[in-house]
Amino acid sequence: MPAWGRFRGFTVIELLVVIALIALLAALLTPVLYSARRAAQRTVCASNLRQIGLAVRMYRDDYQELPPYLSAVHGYVGDSRVFVCPVDPLEGKHQVRDTLGDAFRLEGDYYLRSGVSYTYVPNWAIARQLGWWEAGPPYGAGKWDELTPLAECHWHWARQFHPTWQTDRVTGARGWVLVLTLNGAVRRLRAEMPPEQFTPVLYR
Ligand SMILES: [Zn+2]
């Protein structure tokens, strides 16, 4: 009898072992691929915020004041998609109003129909209460000068962002808030940190 004739195929046990190994590999790789995708999305978002920061500086040079809302600088950016974060589930079309003040921090598609994902901190009532910004425009000096938060992205939290979040909703959140400062840099903050405890020392 030739040697190949003695091959009887795989046993059920052997097949199960192979299947278990494939499942194990998939389980090991999925979080790696997932976190790589999240990191790539953060990179795109930080690039968006940097371009917006540049546009805000140009706007400020031309008008000697900060814009009344974030998308007012859209004439200074080449592509209005920079206002939309890649992880924002509504792609910037929020129509969210800040009921605590006359302005709203997340303008959504109110001014720019293609939408805005980012918070405009000078219009955020909590930021005004905490003295980060004086009401405007024109806005007073930021509390920490060039390190004062100007715009933020909250969409990278593990927990779903809620447009009317209060401090208690932040508890247990895990992830990063990307912060554009007045000097045009983009830094990171832990998402669970309450606004009252913020100082620029905590930037990463
Ligand atoms: Zn983002």
Image: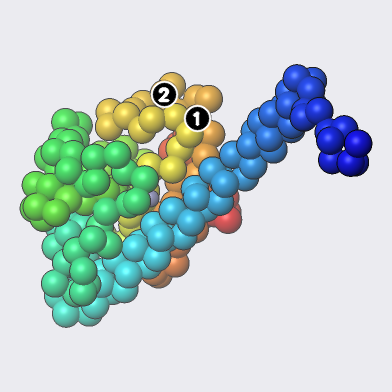
Residue 66, position in %: x, y? 21, 65
**Left or right side of 91 for 34:** right
In this view, 160 is above or below 108: above
* Tag 1–tag 2 contact (CB < 8 Å): yes
| Residue occupying the point 24% across, 77% down | 58
Quarter holding residue 2 = top right
Residue 37 in sight in this render: yes
Question: Which of the two residues, 124 or 157, is positioned nearer the viewer here?
Answer: 157
Residue at disc 2, CB closer than 8 Å to ligand 1: no
* Mark 1 nearby-residue class (10 Å; few <14, some 14–19, many ≥20): some
Left of 78 or right of it: where is 145? right
Q: Residue at x 12, y 47 (%)?
A: 109
Mark 1 and mark 2: Cα distance apart in space: 8 Å
Of residues 72 and 158, the one drawn nearer to the viewer in this rendering: 158
Q: Amino acid at mark 1?
A: Ala
Please state which of residues 179 and 117 is positioned toward the viewer in this rendering: 117
Residue at point 17%, 50% (across, down) = 115
Q: Position of residue 33 (x, y in %)?
A: 57, 46
Location of residue 5 by image quarter: top right
Q: Is residue 102 left or right of residue 156?
A: left
Question: In this image, 54 relative to 28: left or right?
Answer: left
Q: Residue at horizontal 58%, vertical 56%?
A: 204
Residue closest to the eye, 198 or 92: 92
Image quarter (top left, top right, bottom left or bottom right) of the N terminus: top right
Q: Position of residue 28 (x, y in %)?
A: 68, 37
Please determine whether, in this image, residue 142 is positioned above or below residue 171.
below
Q: Amino acid at mark 2?
A: Arg
Query: Is residue 190 something one can see in this rendering?
Result: no
Q: Which residue is mark 1?
A: 173
> SS class of the residue under badge 2?
helix
- Check the image and name the residue furthest to the front: 1
Q: Which residue is mark 2?
A: 169
